[in-house]
Structures are given as structure tokens and as C-alpha cells.
Image: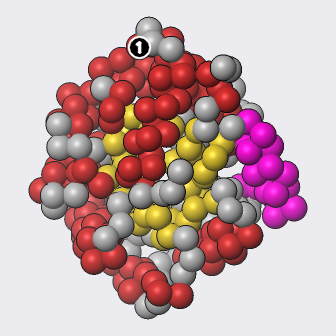
Amino acid sequence: MDPLALPLVDCHAHLYPPNFESDEIDAIVLQAERDQVSAIVVVPEFPDDIQTVQMLAKKNAVIHAAVGLHPVQKGPLPTLTETPIAPHQPRSIQLSEFAFLEALDFSALSRVVCIGECGLDYSPHILNTLLPIASVEQQKEVQAAVFQKHIDLAKSQSLPLNIHSRSAGHYAVDMVIQNNVAASSLLHAFDGKPSHALQACSHGAFFSVAPIVVRSPHLQKLVKELPLTNLVLETDAPALGPEKGVPNHPSNLALAACEIAKIKGIPVAQVAQITTENAHRLFRMEK
Ligand SMILES: [Zn+2]
């Protein structure tokens, strides 16, 4: 049996405009299904994305929805519209923006399998945007407070978390362990130290591996050190592709599985089987 004939799960993708044109998404999903992708968790970033993801999930059985707000939002601050921030300029999320999620009626939403994309982004270029309105420390505190609200929401909805952490891996790991939600957490595109990732694994956390693993020594190291029982696959499409500057899509998922097999010296069929089982367990998806 062709090992790649086994189903694969894309645990984190951004299949909506402006990342992709609306009229190309159906074809991308169809091609992914032909390439053995049995489920795609589509993760919103901004408030408007949430309804778009809902529409996609209603239309395509392979798509599962997430609900959450990325720690990096864009444009003027909701409370200080006169601040000179350009409409699409990335900046740290504000506490007041979480009200959008509090106002959502979860019982009216379809096929929601997790809370996300949420988390912490302590990249200097993000934290510098709001200086001098808010200090770097203040922005970190606000991001942590918004992430805590996502964790509380995940607990109240009995849903797992789909977590972004950049230049903040250690802090994200600490928060999921302290909140006792590590076993229902997926840390995507983790750029922290393998020692912190291993600490999270010992509490049951999952880490996702994208096709960029073929050209990322950091991710290769992480794959080498973490047990397969804690790994799942993602594309983060259109980001984290195998080729620099070329948009990524869910059909590339098998490349990540093959690279994990190579690094660990195990059959790719085993990688496909275990990562898919892990994803089904984490998101409580039907096989
Ligand atoms: Zn993402």
C-alpha cells in the first residue's frame, strides 16, 4: 500500500481572502483531497475572518472551523482612532477587541473544533508599533491577558486551543501548563527552545510541523527532539511553504510527513498514521 494513501490532517491553515482569492479556494480544497488531506482546520486571524471560515466550513465537509483572534491585529486602535496607525499596519491586539468573541453565539456556529488562532507575539517589530502609546511591557501584558481570555473561552466551550507564539514560546508554554490546558493545546510554528517544547510535551501538548521543515534547521531540530506522539501536521497556508516566496497550500502536507520520517528514520506511513490519530484525538474529529 502506498504510504501516502493514508489520510493526513492539516491542523492550521488560512484558506480565505486576501491570502487566497475566493474563487480559487474550492480548487485548492479539491486538490488537497486528491492529495490525501482528509481534514483542514481553517484558523481565523481577524474578526471578519470568523464568518468567512464559517461559510467555508458549511460548504466543504473537509474544512473544520476555528474561532479566535490573532495576537497581531491591524489598523487603528479601536479606542484611539486618532492614533497614526495605517489601516493594514500590524500591531498588538487590544483587550477591548476580545469583546467581539464574547458577543458570539457559539450555539449558532458550525463545525468549530478549536479556539484560535490565539497566543502571544513578542516580535520587536510588532511591539514597537504602539510606542510610545503603550510600552513594550504593557503590550506584552495585554497580549497575555487576551490569551488568558481565549484559554478561559476554550475551557468554557470544552474546546482545544490552536496557539501562535513568536519570540514568546517559553511564555506560551508556561501559560498552557499553569492553566492545565497543555493536553488540549496545539502550539503551531513554535520558534522557542526544544527544552521548553519538551516541557509542554510532558504535559501532553501537541506541536505542528509545516512543509517549511524541509528548509528550516530550527524545525528539523524540534522534530528530532519531540516524540511523534506529540506531533501533528500543518501548512499555515499560505505561509511556511517548502519553497521560499511561493504560496503554501494543504497539498504540500505530505512533504512535512516525509521530512519527519527522514529525520526520525521511520516509515512515512507511521508518521501519517500517528499524526492523523493525534489530530483526531486533539480536535475530537470523526475519522
Ligand atoms: Zn497561522
Percent coordinates x, y for residue 287 in the rendering: 53, 51
Q: Residue at x 60, y 52 (%)?
A: 40
Percent coordinates x, y for residue 240 in the rendering: 59, 36
Q: Residue at x 50, y 70 (%)?
A: 112
Identify which residue, 240 or 261, lies in the foreground: 261
Residue at far top of view: 265
Identify which residue, 45 or 133, lies in the foreground: 45
Compared with 75, 173 (above or below) is above
In the image, taking residue 279 as reference, residue 22 lies left or right, namely: right
The amino acid beneath tag 1 is: Lys
Check if residue 166 falls in the magenta segment: no
In the image, taking residue 206 as reference, residue 249 lies left or right, namely: right
According to the image, label 1 marks what residue? Answer: 264
Percent coordinates x, y for residue 17 in the rendering: 73, 63
Magenta residues, start to end: 19-35
Question: Can you say which quadrant of the picture contains the N terminus?
Answer: top right
Q: Residue at x 79, y 57 (%)?
A: 25
In the image, taking residue 128 as reference, residue 136 lies left or right, namely: left
Check if residue 23 falls in the magenta segment: yes
In the image, taking residue 68 as reference, residue 176 lies left or right, namely: left
Compared with 35, 47 (above or below) is below
Q: Residue at x 27, y 77 (%)?
A: 156
Identify which residue, 6 or 178, lies in the foreground: 6
Name which quarter of the figure residue 86 lies in. bottom right
Residue 201: tell me if it is visible.
yes
Residue 132: tell me if it is visible.
no
